[in-house]
Image: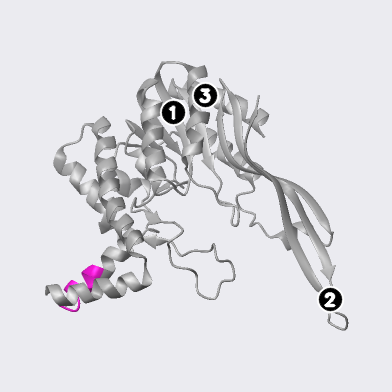
Amino acid sequence: MRKDRLDLYRQLEEQRDSKLIVYVTGTRSGLETQIANDVLPKFAEHLDKIGDTEKISLYLYTNGGDTLAAWSLVNLIRSFCNKLEIIIPSNCFSSGTLICLGADNIVMTKQATLGPIDPSINGPLNPMIPGFSDPNAKIPVSVEHVNAYIEMAKKDFGITDQRNMTDILLHLSEKIHPLTLGQVYKSKSQIQMLARKLMRWQKLETEKEDTIIKFLCSESGSHDYSIRRKEAAESLGLPIEKPSMALYSIIKEIFDDINKELELESPYNPNIILNGTTNYPYSFRRVLVESLANGTDVFLSEGELVKQMITPAPGMAPQINLSDNRIFEGWKHED
């Protein structure tokens, strides 16, 4: 819990000669969260309490999220400091990697991983998951998967004439809504523009910027590709720092405690949680924003799991009905 982490936060600030903000988006299976715009007011409150300072260390763990929210977050933090460093204990994928491009320095542990920044489109017009009963369950549309489909038609099948390419696009639009395809094109251009704007803080040569953007946006080949510390530093040329053993111990101890608090390694399974009981009141902690200056902002889901035996009709076998009665979902502040 936070009270157990306070001394670790003080040690980290002393070692880095900076002010620390911790941002963790939960990756608990079934309760995953992402970087989103609703975190910006929370960061603003922490930054107001910290005030203008020379350096801020952002301790970041995330599987990604909204790219514009990531862009806005970097610019918000940058308005309060001259130097920004990112400390990565483990996962820092997609939009998390985009945030790193706006840093002067990136501290990566042995377990730390970056990833491609090619976005996936999630929206109401996305294709439905076949055979899935929930009408709101949609298939994310990967920008790079759409690009790969078109490139495969051109390169592997030699289709280059306008008429056949039109047929391919028409067939694709039967599977994916045309407005979603338009969003795919827009997102690809947008992510490259945001990456380039963020890297201006690193003062890299244009050729080096091009290499990084090209790899992170397309050449890595898969959204699941993991970029470890050595590759990030030597192949991409990012400003990577290997932590000392003392610093590594602090970073790991902080993450181990947050991992336990957010139950990141425990999949959300109502049957296991109920464990033979008929009801279970819950309060799941899903996102943390913390600092010594302004306490903790936590994104919570609260409610009650209820299991009931229901007989559909006389003579029919009883069925188990499991319901999740959620009564609150949002941010709460804890001093």
Residue hosting label 2: 318
Does residue 307 appear left or right of residue 131 in this picture?
Answer: right
Q: Residue at x 59, y 56 (%)?
A: 29
Residue 310 in picture, x, y percent from top left: 83, 70
Q: Residue at x 44, y 21 (%)?
A: 18
Residue hosting label 3: 46
Report the front residue among 162 and 209: 162
For badge 2, the amino acid type reads Pro
Q: Is residue 235 visible?
A: no
Using the image, determine if residue 303 lies above or below residue 41.
Answer: below
Q: Are marks 2 and 3 in contact (CB under 8 Å)?
A: no
For badge 1, the amino acid type reads Ser
Using the image, determine if residue 215 lies above or below residue 103.
Answer: below
Tell which tag, 2 or 3, sits nearer the viewer. Answer: 2
Residue 75 in picture, x, y percent from top left: 36, 30
The residue range painted magenta reads: 150-159
